[in-house]
Amino acid sequence: MSTGHHAGRPKSWVAVSIIFIGFTIGGAGIVMGPDWIVFGIGAAVTVLGGIVALAVDIMADVVIDEPQQ
């Protein structure tokens, strides 16, 4: 049985949301022509989200369950 939970901390979800928004902006930029300026903005937002993820130590949310038998 799992002793932890897999939900993550709220600040980790903020980082994931920023990354998701960046991918959405970048995807819209590709679909719209491609519009490389919009794509670049999306890429920058995604990188910003990655920096935020590192700053909030998102990898501390990893829960390793004991092996099931």
Image: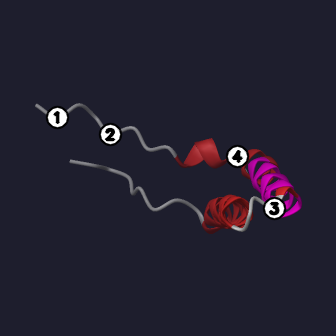
Quarter of the C terminus within the rendering: top left
Task: Say few, some or many: other residues with alpha carbon within 10 Å of mark 4 (under 14 / 14 to 19 / 20 or more).
Answer: few
Q: CA distance from mark 2 to mark 4?
A: 20 Å
Instruction: Mark 4 and mark 1 in contact? Answer it, CB < 8 Å.
Output: no
**Is residue 18 left or right of 38 when viewed as pictured?**
left
Taking depth in this image into account, of 65 and 14 the one nearest to the observer is 14
Disc 4 marks which residue? 57
Give the mark nearest the N terminus, 2 or 3: 3
Residue type at the position of mark 3: Asp
Give the mark nearest the N terminus, 4 or 3: 3
Q: Residue at x 75, y 48 (%)?
A: 50
Taking depth in this image into account, of 66 and 33 the one nearest to the observer is 33
**Is residue 2 left or right of 29 when viewed as pictured?**
left
Q: CA distance from mark 1 to mark 2?
A: 8 Å
Q: CA distance from mark 3 to mark 1?
A: 49 Å
Disc 1 marks which residue? 68
Residue type at the position of mark 2: Asp
Compared with 54, 46 (above or below) is: below
Give the mark nearest the N terminus, 3 or 1: 3
Disc 2 marks which residue? 65
Instruction: Mark 2 and mark 4 in contact? Answer it, CB < 8 Å.
Output: no
Task: Say few, some or many: other residues with alpha carbon within 10 Å of mark 3 (under 14 / 14 to 19 / 20 or more).
Answer: some
